[in-house]
Image (cartoon, helix red, strand yellow):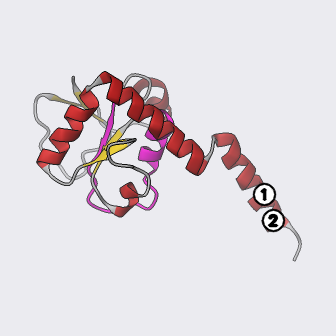
């Protein structure tokens, strides 16, 4: 039951002593070090970033997500099924409690993985789509 914060603290937010801030990390570090051992991902962004890539990657790895209820997050998270949407401190606390149940956490993580697989496919599917696009674009006019 520890909170580990990953990423730069660009806003200079005061991080409490009980939270572990590790600073920026790359995709390999997320994939090899963090995703295999975490029980949830929290993204409380107040601005849209288009497709929330880190959320998609976490869900594809079977990690349930607690996120703010902005449209980009609502597009991929089904509240109480494959993740949790929290717009207030109380909703956030409820999400943490929800994920603290190991059975719920595993079920939500599996639902998250399946949701991304069915909506986005696998890396092989993505590579095939890119190849089709590149082939189409490289055809003589």
Q: Quadrant of residue 24?
A: top left
* Residue furthest right in the image: 140
User: Is 11 positioned to the left or the right of 14 in the image?
Assistant: right
Q: Percent x, y for residue 17? A: 10, 30
Q: Up-down: is 69 above or below 105?
A: below
Q: What residue is rendered at 23% in x and 40% in y?
A: 95
* Residue furthest bottom in the image: 141
Q: Percent x, y for residue 23? A: 30, 36
Q: Closest to the observer: 24 or 30?
A: 30
The answer to whether mark 1 and mark 2 are in CB contact below 8 A is yes
Q: Residues within 10 Å of mark 2 (few under 14, many from 20)?
A: few
Which residue is under mark 2? 136
Q: Up-down: is 71 above or below 97?
A: below
Q: What residue is rendered at 50% in x and 32% in y?
A: 28
Q: Percent x, y for residue 71? A: 36, 63
Does the rendering let one see residue 63?
Answer: no
Q: Closest to the observer: 62 or 31?
A: 62
For marks 1 and 2, give the CA distance: 6 Å
**SS assignment at label 2:** helix
Residue 59 lies in the magenta stretch: yes
User: Is 125 positioned to the left or the right of 3 in the image?
Assistant: right
Magenta-drawn segment: 39-63
Q: Up-down: is 50 above or below 97?
A: below
Which residue is under mark 1? 132
On-image quarter of the N terminus: top left
């Amino acid at each position: 039951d520890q909170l580990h914060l990953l990423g730069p603290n660009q806003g200079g937010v005061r991080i409490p002593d009980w939270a572990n801030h590790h600073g920026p990390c790359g995709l390999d570090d997320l994939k090899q070090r963090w995703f295999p051992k975490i029980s949830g991902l929290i993204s409380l962004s107040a601005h849209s970033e288009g497709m929330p890539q880190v959320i998609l990657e976490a869900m594809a790895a079977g990690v349930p997500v607690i996120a703010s209820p902005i449209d980009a997050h609502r597009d991929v998270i089904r509240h109480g099924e494959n993740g949790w949407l929290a717009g207030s401190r109380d909703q956030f606390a409820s999400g943490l409690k929800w994920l603290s149940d190991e059975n719920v956490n595993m079920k939500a993580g599996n639902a998250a993985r399946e949701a991304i697989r069915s909506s986005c496919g696998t890396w092989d599917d993505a590579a095939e789509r890119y190849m089709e696009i590149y082939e189409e674009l490289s055809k003589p006019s």
